[in-house]
Image: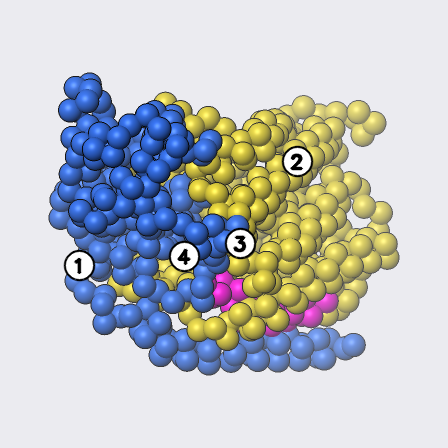
Amino acid sequence: MKYESQKIAYNYFVVATLLFGLQVIFGLITGAKYVWDFDPLLNILPFNTARAIHINLLVVWLLFGFMGGTYYIVPEEAKTEIYSPKLAQLQLWLFAAIGVTAIIGYIAGWSWGMPFLEQPTVLKIGIVVVALIFLFNVFMTMIKTKEWTVIQGVLLGGLVMLALLFLFGIFFMKNLTTQYYYWWWVIHLWVEGAWELITGSIMAFILLKLTGVDRELVEKWLYIEVGLVLFTGMAGTGHHYYWIGTPKYWLWVGAVFSALEPLPILFMVIDTLRDVKERKVEIENKLVLYWAVGGVVMHFFGAGVWGFAHTLPQINQWTHGTQITASHGHFAFFGAYVMLNLTMIYFALPQIKGVKVFNQGLGFKAFWTMNFFMIIMVLGLAVAGVIQTYFQRVLGMDYLTTQGFMRLWFAVFWVSAWGFAAGALMYIIDFFTMGRIQKSPAG
Amino acid sequence: MTLSQAKAVFIWGTVSSAVILLALTYNSLSQIPQRTHEDRLDAQVASGKWVWQKHNCNDCHTILGIGGYYAPDLTKVMSYRDAGWMKRFLKDPEKVWPADRKMPNLHLTDQEITELTAFLGWVNGIDTNNWPPKPVAAAAATASEKPGEAVFKAQGCSACHTINGVGGKVGPDLTKVGGRRTKEWIEEQLKNPKSHNPDSIMPSYAKLPEKDREALVDYLSGLK
């Protein structure tokens, strides 16, 4: 850590970590409702509210992680302190307050009702204000730089894209098809566009620092990766326009572009492995290496392979709206974005805390536990999804009867979710105790 | 490859895909009004959409295949439920559909129920490129379906009653009901369930159109 203001990242990581824990708790509550039909919380915390909170917490903690990561990276890239640490603090508190209000609001029945964008309009305006403060602060820091690096350029591009696209999720439209048309500009173009840009630049920064390879090599690959991400991802929005009332040509456009979507992720895997192989310095923080390499591999399988499996219209017409999507959602978000954030946190945290050597035992346990159980979880949901697709869609069995045949696999999913929760808890403990208990390098 | 060549890949990749997306968006927006029958999208439907959003229905139910997977997809629900059934259900879900997995009573006003039903009716007319596809097995079965069987399905009778192993367990098994009960008995039971058993919790189907009730009675009395 070279600049004092990089420490701002710490508070963002604290909030991200706490919300991650809360997200897992709400996930366990939501999942239980699939295992047992009888729901003692039916009138207090019904499925829709629990699901909204589970997913909102995911999105918000990942955003806190991205913001913290940005505040950590930008000073080193721009070679200057953050423009205004006070604004960064204000932004953090404002965003956290909006998040808490939204969650309490959902429980009280205050909702805007589009999935993932359930925040009532007044809170959405607050989120826009948070985004403006953030972008202003980042931009004012970056313009002090003497040399624009590709990493900060792509990062800024991703953040601006993220903020602009959010605007398409604010307005009420009378026509459900049009509403969903633009809803996907937020949901799809975030995760298969803006977030990939942010992820690419954060990964490039970490690989650069970790392996000591040439900046030019890293930045060249970054350009190619994000270029391909946007090339396949933007027109690839079409795979969401197969069945929502949009014209038929999207079946072709969506199929062609989204079939190519795994390609840039594959490049990311190759690039990461090559950087590690051709490293010029010895990698001391092995835990970060594991999270980084594990992250790109899980990103490839979760987003790339699992996504490709049901993206072609011939398959998607049967699987659309089933638990196959839920399986893909869990796998992709964990592989692509949860692991990226944890990579960033494990990279930055020891430096912020000033810990040179720390016991990585718990961190490794958290890594293996979370990964192992997440794989069982997504396999459980995938089997449930295949049953649902076959019984309900192909054979025409009614919805609720089919759910009964899926119950065993919901149970597999839910029990392994407890295993995942144990891994998440290990990470949370590690986060807060790192540096407090000093151990020898051998320990 | 040099850095500037990589930059060119980035710029051209981004620009070309953005142009495709924007051009097709322009075209899609011109086709959506016709494909969704926007002429039928009146104030009542729009209010119904807001009822749908306000109560966060979409985080349990999918619609157009998007949303929560906890409850049935509602894109084409009005193809197999009539408006009367839907209104009775929304007024008190548990009474009409006493399944183990419950929908909470949202305490909607009569006006909200009418609006929401109008919204679902409008959604039913959206051209979804034939999604969801007709199930392969059910397509074969419906070819030989009796009119009364369709009424049985549309009224959601299987929520409580089982026929040939499929259905709920709240009411009696109807697999061989035609052997036990006469046509007249069944008709009376549909009109006034309490006439045979004062404690019956079965809702009355007296408001069912005459034609549908006759078809249903024919179908049930034929189950022997």
Q: Name the residue that disc number 1 marks.
A: B44
Task: Tell us which disc is closer to us: 3 or 4.
Answer: 3
Please report whichever mark, 3 or 4, sits nearer to the chain's N-terminal start.
4
- Tell me which segment is drawn in magenta: A221-243
Q: CA distance from mark 2 to mark 4?
A: 29 Å
The amino acid on which the numbered mark 3 sits, given as a three-letter code, is: Val
Q: Amino acid at mark 4?
A: Leu
Depth check, mark 1 against mark 3: the one in front is 3
Neighbourhood count class around disc 2 (C-alpha, 10 Å): few under 14, some 14–19, many 20 upward: some
Q: Position of residue A429 (x, y in %)?
A: 60, 27
Q: Kindly tell me whether residue A421 is visible in this rendering.
A: no
**Alpha carbon distance from label 1 to label 3:** 36 Å
Chain that appears yellow: A
Q: CA distance from mark 2 to mark 3?
A: 31 Å
Q: Contact, CB < 8 Å: mark 3 with mark 4? A: no
**Residue at x 24% of width, y 47% of height:** B212
Residue B142 at least partly seen: yes
Looking at the picture, do discs 4 and 1 lie on one chain?
yes
The kind of residue on which mark 1 rests is Gln
Q: Is residue A231 magenta?
A: yes
Mark 2 to mark 1 CA distance (whole Å): 46 Å
**Protein chain holding label 4:** B
Q: Secondary structure under badge 2?
A: helix
**Residue occupied by mark 3:** B136
Query: Do the residues indicated by labels 2 and 3 lie within the same chain of the protein?
Result: no
Instruction: Give residue A63's position: percent from left, percent from top.
Output: 49, 49
Give the distance between the C-alpha atoms of the residues marked 4 and 1, in whole angstroms.
Answer: 20 Å
Chain B as rendered: colour: blue
Give the residue displayed 62% in from the left and 76% down from the top.
Answer: B13
**Dot label at residue B64:** 4
Q: Residue at x 73, y 62 (%)?
A: A267
